[in-house]
Amino acid sequence: MAATSRRAKTVLIVGIVLVVVGVIAVVVPRMMSALTAQARPATTPSSSAAETPTPTPSATPSAASTPTPSASTPPPPPPPPSRAQQVLAGLSLEQRVGQVMMVSSPVAGADPATLADLRSNRIGNVFLKGRTTAGAGAVGDVVRALRAEATQTGPTTVAPFVATDQEGGQVQILRGPGFSAIPSALAQGGMDPAALSSAATEWGQELAAVGVNVNFAPVMDTVPSAAFAPQNIPIGKYEREYGFDPATVSSHGVAFAHAMAQAGVAAVPKHFPGLGRVTANTDTSTNVTDAQTSRTDPYLAPFADAIRSGVGWVMLSNALYPAIDGEHLAVFSPAVIDLLRKDLGFGGIVVSDDICDAAQVGGLRPESRGADFLAAGGTMVLCTDEALAPRLWQGIVDQARSDPGFARVVDNAALTVLEAKDRAGLLSH
């Protein structure tokens, strides 16, 4: 019993010693750390990284030194409206519709119907149609007169886009002194792209000098072969193609478009998604169909390259493309415009081919044509029949008045046009 008692006392003493040692092991380092922290100066200038204290993982910033987001903190103010947005806000519905339309005028001078469209219907963009050999002086006078009629006045003046077809070859509206004799696109396709760019810059400067700021060119349609070209009535028959493969069309079409931009003229690649395979002309025939072109077609490459190069306009075809959309002509097709916008990433002005005189659209009510084009995602309606333009204009106005959703479509299209006009220097105080 005595031996057992002594062993118990020994165990008890050892246990007490171990507890005391454990307490000392915990408390002493903390006391030393506290004393060291009190002895350290509040701020110590550091001359090198080696002298900078390194925080330990347990160091935690205090709430006082770390700002925390507050639910009551107001959000940053929205950016101020752009000049185009300010102009849009000051336009009536009728004026907004006018900004998304382009009406034709005979190149020799405005007729009464054109003047009525510009004055009464506030249409804000003009296309020079027909042919002239009168030269730059006469064309400049016509453009200045049209510009005066089509300009919207207010806190900010909104000048018009003035367009024409100056492709070359058999499609060259402006001729005579001051305008070069431009070779056909097929001949241009045989030039070195650098040489073409140099020549096209001069052609663009000739347009800019008379006040034309949009050229409905280059044709980016690919005709499959020289043998097929005579059967391809809208393009190949007139040598409007740059070549017979997408690479040639792309290199030369992009060179042409870039040169126009250098001269201050917006180039307009056409006719998306391509008219190189059809055998009839949508201007003079109905039921014009391309059954081959698809959403992944290699003939889309020239358009894609033009978009990547920075063009701000693309013109749609009036043909039907059942492999993309079997129900709507391209100019009225959400699927075709979605292909252009989403697949190819185009964010600029989508302009229709003519939807007034073209036989392809002759069976459709004029009042619905412009509205249907805009509803599908288009931006600017081209009407080359100045006598028919008021019906398209009225159809857009009426639908916007009755449908708030469509009114927003018109606003978005008008804003796209005004933003392009601002970049082109057509908005001024």
Image (cartoon, rainbow, N blue to C red):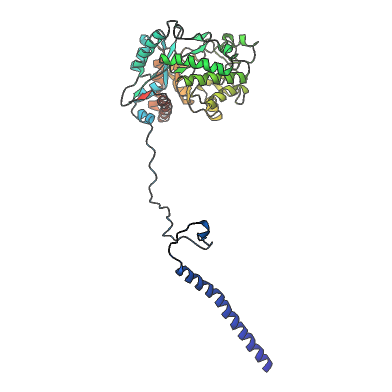
Q: Residue at left 55%, top 77%?
A: 24
Q: Residue 387's spot in the image, x, y percent?
A: 40, 11
Identify whether 58 is placed above or below 327.
below
Q: Residue 28's spot in the image, x, y percent?
A: 53, 75
Of residues 108 and 388, which is closer to you in this image?
108
Q: Residue at left 43%, top 60%?
A: 63
Task: Decide if residue 180 is in sight here.
Answer: yes
Based on the displayed image, in which of its 4 quarters is residue 186 positioned? top right
Question: Is 99 displayed left or right of 155 in the figure?
Answer: right
Question: Is 43 displayed left or right of 324 in the figure?
Answer: left
Of residues 58 and 379, which is closer to you in this image?
58
Q: Residue furthest bottom?
A: 2
Q: How many marks?
A: 0
Q: Residue 417's spot in the image, x, y percent?
A: 42, 25
Q: Residue at left 38%, top 47%?
A: 74
Task: Decide if residue 351 is in sight here.
Answer: no
Q: Residue at left 45%, top 18%?
A: 214
Q: Which quadrant holds the N terminus?
A: bottom right
Q: Residue 162's spot in the image, x, y percent?
A: 42, 17
Q: Which quadrant holds the C terminus?
A: top left
